[in-house]
């Protein structure tokens, strides 16, 4: 049972909750009134499109083909991606092709998909070779180059604005690394817009210009934002409550575990700072719960409650990860029964960084193709294998007492720092090899991106790694060694002390906060393919297109 009960305040003597509820109510009422003023010229095509869609009785499930060149797709909702996509109904028979590839040598994703089709799947092309084949829908993604593309046969093609919407449907999931979920969302959006066998398509939602459209649109946005605030506030409270129940149940145990942490060397100060913040946040969270109490119905439509629940979720999530860190530290430094599990979690970020380095140097050396590049690749790959072997040996040495837990973590720090040196060397060598003006600009863009310390917000540790053929999962937020996803670390306040390494202001100078090398791989790919053209939707098939004019486009995420 929780040692500290959640406090719920139902009275509102200050009237703050009533004021918040009034704001929410006024938002929704005003938004509805404005939205209902929409002109008939907008309503008519929407109504007619809805009637047409309702009359369309036939549904066809696609023939799904998946080509996962980057090993990005996994199960979703307990089913394979192919099974999940096979349940998305279209309005005509289609072949739905899903492709992941990081082979984008020119930076033009449309060209890369076309070249892949020409080399490996000529059946995707029309008889003339200048269009995509009839009945074809291709959804493609490049995880490393952060590109998403959509391509259609002549009888399945949709307008560029609809292609944009299909691509946008996948981007939130793609940015979070949920590649399978993003493909499912894109497929659902494509099924919505791909026409039926007679060429009838769903209304595009393009509204007529003018003051009436603008006013009505503002009303719609206001109502939509109100429901979005409600949904997010309810989600925040649900997740915060789960974290809070865990924290309350573990609070006393965390206090005892921290007091029993043995010799932790230079890591003791970091743990103490995090635990001190944990205790302070515990009291703050109690106050926040009391302040929020039981929200009234209209409060959920107010941004005030959303801001409060954001803060509460951040607090409780951080505490939930921090007490896990304390438990792991106590087990590890005292070599308790759970020290092996703690060690397997600690090596997670290091193994992920080594994996990112291996992928980066392999890609760069293959592209450069010089003897020096190939020799450099061999040297780095051998070094990676040696470090992985050392990490495996360390576990045995800790168990035998030949190496202390502190020395083992210091060895991980050494490997992490050397990994960053290798990554920087590979990136700089590749970017500097291009001596043109564009190459110099790409190098400058990469340098500019190094000044941003919030990369973990977009590309962080995945929380999984393979070692000796076995897949391991862990929580990057609860490791003893600090990284940019650690509980209590704020990316906005970090100060760079080395390539891919930061520290918190006021902390000891030898306290490293490591940034994921997946982010550095992302910054390199972004800079390496950067051009003066816009990042907006691109329908060009590049210099090797050869007159190809099939329907399709791509965009960045």
Image (cartoon, helix red, strand yellow):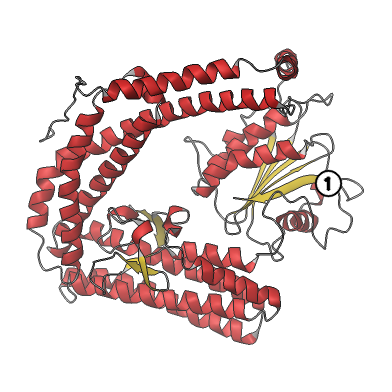
Q: Give the quarter of the figure containing the N terminus.
A: top left
* Residue 357 x/y as whole percent: 48, 70
x, y percent for residue 454: 43, 58
| Mark 1, residue position | 550
Choose between 305 and 254: the one closer to the eye: 305
The residue carrying pointer 1 sits among few (fewer than 14), some (14 to 19) or many (20 or more) residues within 10 Å by Cα, namely: many
Q: Is residue 261 left or right of residue 474?
A: left
Q: Is residue 200 left or right of residue 554?
A: right
- Depth check: 298 or 469 in front? 298
- Left or right position of 249 against 369: left
Say what secondary structure mark 1 lies in: loop
Q: Is residue 381 visible?
A: no
Q: Nearer the viewer, residue 381 or 499?
A: 499
Front-lying residue, 38 or 188? 38
Q: Is residue 191 above or below residue 363?
A: above
Q: Above or below — where is 289 with respect to 326? A: above
Q: Is residue 175 above or below residue 54?
A: below
Rendered residue at 47%/36% (across/down)? 78
């Amino acid at each position: 049972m929780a040692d500290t009960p959640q406090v719920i305040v139902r009275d509102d003597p200050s009237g703050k909750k009533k004021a918040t509820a009034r704001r929410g109510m006024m938002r929704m009422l005003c938004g509805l009134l404005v939205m209902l003023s929409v002109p008939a010229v907008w309503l008519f095509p929407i109504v007619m499109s809805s009637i047409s869609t309702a009359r369309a009785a036939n549904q066809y499930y696609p023939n799904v083909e998946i080509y996962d060149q980057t090993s990005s797709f996994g199960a979703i909702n307990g089913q394979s991606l192919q099974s999940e996509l096979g349940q998305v109904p279209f309005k005509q028979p289609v072949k739905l092709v899903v492709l992941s590839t990081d082979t984008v040598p020119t930076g033009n994703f449309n060209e890369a998909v076309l070249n892949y089709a020409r080399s490996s799947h000529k059946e995707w092309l029309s008889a003339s070779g200048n269009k995509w084949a009839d009945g074809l829908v291709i959804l493609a993604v490049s995880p490393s180059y952060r590109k998403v593309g959509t391509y259609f046969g002549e009888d399945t093609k949709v307008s560029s604005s609809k292609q944009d919407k299909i691509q946008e449907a996948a981007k939130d999931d793609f940015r979070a690394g949920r590649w399978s979920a993003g493909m499912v969302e894109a497929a659902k959006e494509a099924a919505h817009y791909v026409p039926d066998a007679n060429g009838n398509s769903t209304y595009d939602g393009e509204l007529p210009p003018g003051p009436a459209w603008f006013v009505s649109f503002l009303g719609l946005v206001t109502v939509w934002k109100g429901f979005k605030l409600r949904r997010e506030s309810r989600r925040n409270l649900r997740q915060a409550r789960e974290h809070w129940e865990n924290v309350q149940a573990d609070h006393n145990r965390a206090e005892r575990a921290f007091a029993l942490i043995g010799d932790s060397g230079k890591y003791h100060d970091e743990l103490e700072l995090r635990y001190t913040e944990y205790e302070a946040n515990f009291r703050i969270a109690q106050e926040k719960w009391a302040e929020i109490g039981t929200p009234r119905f209209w409060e959920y439509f107010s941004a005030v409650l959303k801001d409060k629940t954001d803060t509460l979720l951040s607090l409780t999530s951080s505490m939930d990860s921090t007490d896990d860190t304390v438990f792991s530290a106590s087990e590890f430094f005292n070599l308790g029964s759970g020290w092996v599990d703690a060690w397997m979690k600690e090596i997670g970020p290091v193994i992920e960084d080594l994996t990112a380095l291996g992928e980066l140097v392999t890609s760069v050396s293959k592209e450069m193709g010089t003897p020096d590049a190939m020799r450099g690749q061999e040297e780095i790959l051998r070094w990676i294998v040696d470090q992985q072997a050392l990490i495996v040996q360390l576990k045995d040495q800790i168990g035998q007492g030949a190496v202390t837990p502190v020395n083992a973590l210091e060895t991980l720090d050494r490997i992490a720092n050397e990994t960053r040196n290798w990554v920087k060397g590979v990136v700089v060598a590749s970017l500097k090899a291009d001596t043109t003006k564009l190459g110099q600009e790409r190098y400058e863009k990469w340098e500019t991106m190094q000044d941003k310390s919030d990369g973990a917000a977009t590309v962080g540790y995945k929380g999984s790694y393979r070692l000796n053929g076995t897949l391991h999962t862990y929580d990057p937020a609860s490791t003893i060694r600090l990284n940019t996803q650690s509980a209590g670390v704020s990316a906005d306040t970090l100060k760079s002390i080395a390539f891919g390494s930061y520290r918190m202001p006021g902390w000891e100078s030898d306290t490293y906060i490591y940034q994921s090398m997946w982010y550095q791989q992302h910054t390199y790919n972004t800079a390496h393919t950067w051009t003066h053209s816009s990042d907006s939707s691109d329908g060009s098939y590049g210099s090797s297109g050869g007159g190809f004019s099939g329907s399709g486009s791509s965009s960045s995420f």
